[in-house]
């Protein structure tokens, strides 16, 4: 069974940066796509960034060039570099890995943007 472990969350001031990492128990090229979703209190879970098998990335509209998703096959990991964070980016961030028949989710990691 696939396991995903997230790290790198925490508290950051507005305008600051954080780097989230998601380590996989399986080769990251095993998945159709991998990426990050987030959920704020009272809101639905939304897509933040995804990378597919071909290495193509897509981002949520709210990202507006602030985040960069990368993949390291050797380390079996994806990283999300988040810059110029704003209070509205505060959420629990979830790593997800999609195969043909199922999606595996990480346990979630909290990102708080506050002064």
Image (cartoon, rainbow, N blue to C red):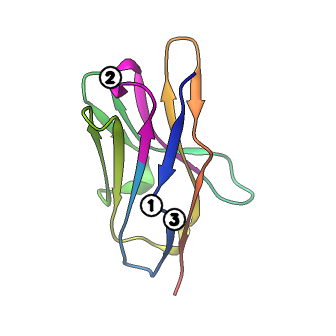
SS at circle 1: loop
- Helix, strand or loop for disc 3: helix
Q: Where is residue 75 in the image (x, y as percent from the top left)?
A: 29, 38
Residue at the location (44% across, 61% down)? 8
Quarter of the rendering occupied by the N terminus: top right
Where residue 8 is drawn, which disc sits there?
1
* Above or below, 4 relative to 90: above
Asked whether, in this view, residue 66 is left or right of residue 35, the answer is left
Q: Which residue is at the front of the view, 93 or 4?
A: 4
CA neighbours of label 1 inside 10 A, class few (<14), some (14 to 19), many (20+): some
Residue 82 drawn at (x, y percent): 36, 61
Q: What is the quadrant of residue 45 in the picture?
A: top right
Distance of label 3 from label 2 (alpha carbons): 28 Å
Q: Earlier in the sequence, mark 1 or mark 3?
A: 1
User: Was residue 41 drawn as part of the magenta stretch in this picture?
Assistant: no
Separation of disc 1 and disc 3 at Cα?
A: 15 Å
Q: Mark 3 points at which residue?
A: 89
Q: Position of residue 19 (x, y in %)?
A: 36, 60
Which residue is painted at 49% across and 24% down in the image? 98
Determine whether, in the image, residue 115 is placed left or right of residue 58: right
Q: Is residue 36 left or right of residue 16?
A: right
- Does 32 lie within the magenta span? yes
Of circles 1 and 3, the one toward us is 1
Identify residue for label 2: 29
- The residue carrying pointer 2 sits among few (fewer than 14), some (14 to 19) or many (20 or more) residues within 10 Å by Cα, namely some
The magenta segment is 22-38
| Residue 65 occupies quadrant | bottom left
């Amino acid at each position: 069974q696939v396991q995903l472990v997230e790290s790198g969350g925490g508290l950051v001031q507005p305008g600051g940066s954080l780097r989230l990492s998601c380590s996989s128990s399986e080769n990251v090229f095993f998945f159709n796509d991998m990426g990050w979703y987030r959920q704020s209190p009272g809101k639905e879970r939304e897509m933040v960034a995804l990378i597919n098998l071909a290495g193509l990335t897509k981002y949520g509209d709210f990202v507006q060039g602030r985040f960069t998703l990368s993949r390291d096959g050797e380390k079996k990991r994806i990283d999300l570099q988040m810059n110029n964070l704003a209070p509205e980016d505060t959420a629990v961030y979830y790593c997800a890995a999609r195969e043909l028949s199922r999606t595996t989710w990480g346990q979630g990691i909290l990102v708080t943007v506050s002064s």
